[in-house]
Amino acid sequence: MAGSCDLNWEDPKITTYPGNPHPLGAFYDGHGINFALYSECGTRPFLCLFRPAHDATHELVEYARIKMKERTHHIWHIYLPDFEPGQIYGYRVDGPYDPQNGHRFNVNKLLIDPYARAITGKLEWDDALFGYDVNDQSPEKDLSFSTVDSAPFMPKCVVIDSSNFNWGGDTPLNIPFHETIIYELHVKGFTKLLPDIPEEIRGTYAGLAHPTTIEYFKKLGITAVELMPVQHFVTDRYLKDRGLTNYWGYHTLGFFAPDVRYSSSGTYGEQVLEFKRMVKKLHKAGIEVILDVVYNHTGEGNQLGPTLSFKGIDNSSYYRLTEHDKRFYFDYTGTGNTLNCRLPNVLRLIMDSLRYWILDMHVDGFRFDLAATLARELHAVDRLSAFFDIIHQDPIIGRVKLLAEPWDLGEGGYQIGKFPPGWAEWNGKYRDCVRDYWRGQPSILSEFAERFTGSSDLYFEERRGPTASINFLTAHDGFTLHDLVSYNEKHNEMNGEGNLDGESHNRSWNCGAEGPTDDVKVNQFRDCQKRNFLTTLFLSQGIPMLVAGDELGRTQQGNNNAYCQDNEISWLNWEKADQVLLAFTQKLIHLRRQHPVFRRRTWFRGKPVKPGEIDDIAWFKFDGNHMTDEDWQHDYAKSFGVFINGRGMQGRTVFGVRVTDDNFYIIFNAYHGYIDYTLPGEEYAKDWTLILDTSKDEVIIEGDEGRIYQAGEKITVHDYSILLLHHVVPKKEHATAPMV
């Protein structure tokens, strides 16, 4: 049973030295451990040490509470000689409890070290975790003060030795952006039901590193896995009370610690080594690791949230508080709080965390959740904010892949196309436009062409290339690809929020029936639409991102907000995988990887690269004539053809040789009927080989034979389908650049 905290603690005889203010966190130097904690307004920090109880429970008990006396520039520090890795610890910080002035110190609450490299145990929800009396029924109950000790219910920090792992020569892969294919996945959900790996490692870092998993990645053809949050996070109490959990992990508490819930061993600090082994094996297979990181807020919520770490260490030095009453928090994230990136110590925390994951954990890049929040100086999003300044000048962080979710929930938060050079952005406009096109919405042909060619309207003026656009059709947040073509409405009833959560405007189309159906024609149409979406994605300029399971026909049963569903709704069901769709996707990705014309680094010019050559790209109507400005605007227009000149690869050289490719002609038809298309004249190509027809489930690649059509010949295009035609340029006329 929790009780109040005794500040008159009789510590066992422990030798201490003043220690150093740097590095922050707990650092083992081979002789002892240095502890350093930033708290500007705290008056008495205590280092609390734990060990397993000497009984059958082996519960962690606090056996020492040491007052930290040394302070340098708001950093409290102490050194414990002869202490070793594996030591379990936490902090308590005494100071003013004055919420209206931004201070919420409560020494009764055990706190997670913001710089903890490993965290053991899980949060056990209890009233003791709150700095105030949660049973107070008044509207101002958060101004009350709780004297109950929270330690029995808190996870604890673990000291690790960062030098005890042999990377064996592992180095960054540095796969160029234009050759990158991203695969977004959830560590647990991807392998939890995978029958071909040992049951004890399913749903873990070790599961992702298993040969079966890695072989799947290689056959699929992706070059990078983007892991949904793996930094230690907490589950909201209201979810726990409903028997649900925070499955996605967007409630970070430990920005340096890989979450122990994804460790197959569960021993103290072992999750760090397991994560490193995973990265090492993925790198050996040629696959980069990108982390989805959440530096915009923490899992402590608003003024009514628990006191778990930052709130009790120094609330006003970490969070953005309202100006007139610092009791309340600015919330640009929809989670209750926002980290204050205007403050040097918060910027240092973020940058130190990023460097740690790069240098110690060998990750290859980051996707920043709600990245617009990080750029807010006062309230407006500032493209020249301190966050971007530091990122750009940092020689370590600046060399890895930086991906932005370019929006947040605050005013002016939709910042797509406005991030600095060097960043790639989740292109929500690509997603929306392509969805609208394939459900037959009017007046979007011109925008569809813009999105297909890399979204130059968003990035060209900023001196960025097509690879600034991360093209995606689905993400963890929203419908899966299967559900996108199977549901008109969301079906989130199992989330327990009356189906009010999640996006209501999904730009989806159920193809004639809501949800599962035995109608053969509807199911065939849905399969064709999936192929249309995937073909559009992988033939578009930019960086394609595929969500794990979309290539297998994964469904969430219409749930478009499965953030709290740690069960079969979210896990990949390998036994019901659509093997036909998988084979189609594998061949499609292989096609992209074999032809650099689909992964350009520079913009199309719409004119010849050299005098006497044909245009590098050209657009055609069904009658074989060029599209005019007027043609792009017709509401009824749902189809067009595009010629892509493989010899028009401006600026592409390998070892001094100009890189060119074969020519391709793509016909898009989102019309509800068949169309007879006239192919371009001989100046573009004398003959064309049909290598893909999304009305069928095959992709013809090198070595196979497809039907040959002559220039000017008519070709029938099925309703709602794509045709891809290929003209081989003799190898002596061009050099190809295969993928890394």
Image (cartoon, helix red, strand yellow):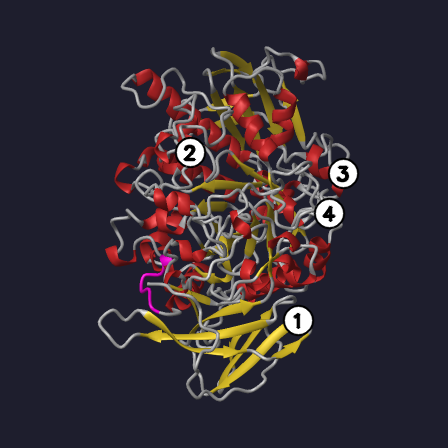
Labels 3 & 1 near each other (Cβ < 8 A): no
Quarter of the figure with residue 547: top left
Foreground mark, 2 or 1, reads 1
What's the residue type where badge 1 is placed? His
Q: Which mark, residue 480?
A: 2
Sequence order check, earlier mark of 3 and 1: 1
Residue at screen point 49% across, 50% down: 251
Q: CA distance from mark 2 to mark 1?
A: 48 Å
Q: Which mark is residue 461?
A: 3
Specify whether residue 681 is in view: no
At mark 4, the secondary structure is: loop
Q: Position of residue 518 (x, y in %)?
A: 27, 19
- Marks 4 & 1, CB-CB < 8 Å contact: no
Q: Position of residue 209 (x, y in %)?
A: 37, 58
Report, in whole angstroms, how far the alpha carbon at label 3 lies from the one at label 1.
Answer: 44 Å
Label 1: state its secondary structure.
loop
Looking at the figure, which quarter contains the N terminus?
bottom left
Residue 73, position in %: x, y? 69, 73
Q: Which residues are magenta?
A: 261-267
Residue position marked by numbered label 1 in the rendering: 74
Q: Pointer 4: what residue?
A: 378
